[in-house]
Image (spheres, rainbow, N blue to C red):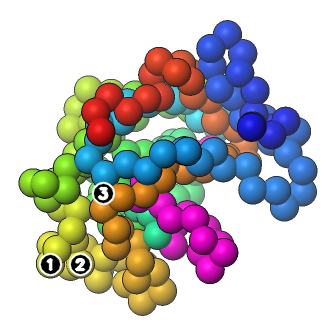
Amino acid sequence: KLGDEWSVVDGVLIFDPRNQEKDQNSDIVSNGKFTNFVLSIEWKIAECGNSGLFWGVHEDKKFFSPYLTGPEIQLLDNERHSDAFMKPKYHQSGALYDIVQPSKDVCNPAGEWNHFLLTINHEINNATVKLNGTEIVSFPVNGPEWEELISKSKFRDKYVLIGASAQGLFDLVKNPLGVTIPGVEVHANVIEN
């Protein structure tokens, strides 16, 4: 069940931070676990917005946040949010957050629709992110190549379990300024698993 901070209006899932209780976790977590998949999501972000989609997440009391176990694809206002200008592009929309930066900035501005297609395939050890039809990120999902990427990120010392398991949950991170996802059943779905 979604909290009052989330609503569905005309087939669009909307997060409104004005309806969120103080210190409430408002993330949306999938019921099922996924391993190999293609996930298609359309989204738009508020000005200065910062959100993300995690996969491979494990829920456990010892993991207080999804970023302790699951990698994240960033959803961000690339023009206004300060994260867009860090390290130099590792926090921009479509990035594998703090691990792989996008090859191009093809993100539409805040308030406009964007689409990403996330493909994860553990059988061939590859993942890709297409943002608005352009492949901008490609990376291994396990093994020495994955471990090398993690060793160069902010997760190298603290978060040793990030991406440690091939199977896990999706977690859509709420945004303190608002995020909008259309087509709860149509667009934000797993195409293959």
Dot 1 corresponds to which residue?
A: 144
Residue 140's place in the image compared with 80, above or below, is below
**What crowding class fits label 1: few (fewer than 14 Cα within 10 Å), some (14-19), or many (20 or more)?**
few
Q: Which residue: 23% across, 32% down?
A: 134
Residue 50 visible, this orientation: no
Mark 1–mark 2 CB contact (< 8 Å):
yes
Tell me what residue is drawn at x 30 percent, y 57 percent: 101
On the picture, is 94 further left or further right than 137?
Answer: right
Please name the amino acid that badge 2 sits on: Glu
Q: Nearer the viewer, residue 137 or 78?
A: 137
Q: Secondary structure at mark 1?
A: helix
**What's the residue type where badge 3 is placed?**
Gln
Judging by the rendered image, the residue that carries numbered circle 2 is: 147
Using the image, determine if residue 41 lies above or below residue 30: above
Say whether disc 1 or disc 3 marks the residue closer to the N-terminus. Answer: 3
Return the residue nearer the eye: 79 or 112. 112
Decide whether residue 41 is among the magenta residues. no
Relative side of 138 to 108, left or right: left
Mark 1 and mark 3: Cα distance apart in space: 19 Å
The disc at residue 101 is 3
Q: Residue at x 84, y 61 (%)?
A: 23
* Span highlighted in magenta in the image: 48-68
- Give the residue type at disc 1: Pro
Q: Nearer the viewer, residue 155 or 84?
A: 155
Q: What element does badge 3 sit on?
A: loop
Q: Residue 118 in the image: x percent, y percent?
A: 31, 41
Image location of residue 137, percent across then percent down = 24, 49
